[in-house]
Amino acid sequence: MKLMRKNLEDLIPYEPGKPIEEVKREYGLKEVIKMASNENCLGPSPLAVEALRKALSNIHLYPDGGGFSLRRKIAQRLGLKMENIILGNGSDEIIRMIVETFLNPGEETIMGDPAFIIYEMATKVMNGNCIKVPLKNYAHDLYAMREKITPRTKLFFVSNPNNPTGTMVRRKEVDEIMKDFPEHTIAVFDEAYYEYIEEEDFPDTLYWLKRGKNIIILRTFSKIYGLAGLRIGYAISSPQIISALNRVRQPFNTNSLAQTAALAALDDEEHVRRSRELNRKGKEYFYREFRRMGLEFIPTATNFILVNVKRDGREVFEKLLRKGIIVRPMSGYGLSTFIRVTIGREEENQKFISSLKEVMEEIENG
Ligand SMILES: *Cc1c(COP(=O)(O)O)cnc(C)c1O
């Protein structure tokens, strides 16, 4: 396309997990399980669904663009002020806003390789330069990333835990790099899976915010809270950074139903607890089964697992589709023999494992 801006030429459109309806249509299937996008297999919080019912009759009104109630509640939970919080149409939108707000053309963003793809896309849209630092043992190499900071580095993205590998960086590493983190660079910690974390040495990024560092923490309602379809997430930062982000924010970026559901979901501690427990059981089941099958996997701090199927991951992905199971092939991330699978409910996990075994045999027997 000749009219397109030049720097968009090597930007490949994001490839999301295949939707259930599409797979049903394409393969003539009645039942399809999606284990491709790290959604909550328990569904949304029942309290959120109830709140949505009540809110439906008000959708003729514009939403509260400033998201007053939700921001206040989030701030209270964190012991912060409303001025420390901004809402986004998913944290994806906040990532875009961060880059739009801070990155001048030609400036650099640092990220892991592979890491969450949206950092790279947002950088390219704004004519920035991505500095991609290879992972070490499938985890962010924070020290190597720190070494790459130059006077032109504006943003430093850490997907923690990392999508697509499921690994996390530890408190000690974050503390070490934050101590003398340069003032001209903003550290962005994307903690989309925060509520799933059970490890004790997960970094305390709020501590560094309170110490006055240029830091943005991203959280979302798409994962454990089960509201991915409504698109709502938030960022936590200094009032100065939040106020800068508000300059580029669209006036009604988060809709009223999303705000209502998020408010209710925050109160549903039972749903969060059940989701976490189910995830822990599913994770242990997968570890056991993968070990039995002799498959290498990356121990995860999230609700998804990266597993090395030792064959073309895309072929395994396609054969699983035919059996009504959607996972994610990882060739786009340079992990051609891997697939990423979201931990599901018990029966879904079993169906996945039995189907994976069948697929592996099919490939073996040509
Ligand atoms: C899922 C995910 C997000 C969140 O996306 P939303 O836009 O809030 O749905 C952000 N970062 C990472 C690393 C993720 O895996």
Image (cartoon, rainbow, N blue to C red):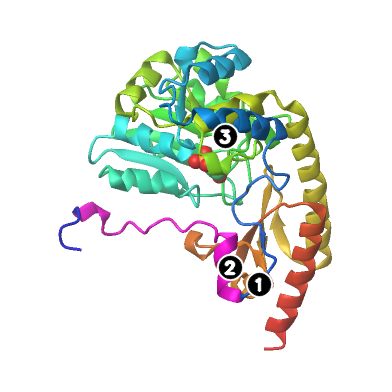
Residue occupied by mark 3: 191
Q: Earlier in the sequence, mark 3 or mark 2?
A: 2
Q: Is residue 215 magenta?
A: no
Give neighbour class at mark 1: few <14, some 14-19, many 20+ (Cα, 10 Å): some
Q: Is residue 252 left or right of residue 188?
A: left
* Residue 28 drawn at (x, y percent): 62, 75
Can you say whether 244 is above or below 26 in the image? above
* Residue 76 drawn at (x, y percent): 59, 12
Do the residues bearing badges 2 and 1 touch, measured as CB atoms within 8 Å? yes
Quadrant hosting residue 193: top right
What's the mark number on residue 23? Answer: 2
Amino acid beneath label 3 = Glu
Q: Which residue is drawn at 69% across and 37% down?
A: 196
Residue occupied by mark 1: 29
Q: Is mark 3 on a helix, strand or loop?
A: loop
Do the residues bearing badges 3 and 2 touch, measured as CB atoms within 8 Å? no
Q: Is mark 2 on a helix, strand or loop?
A: helix
Q: In this view, does 150 lie to the left or right of 358?
A: left
- The verdict on label 1 being within 8 Å of ligand 1 is no
In front: 195, or 68? 68
Q: Give the range drawn in magenta.
A: 6-27
Give neighbour class at mark 2: few <14, some 14-19, many 20+ (Cα, 10 Å): many
* Residue 143 drawn at (x, y percent): 51, 37
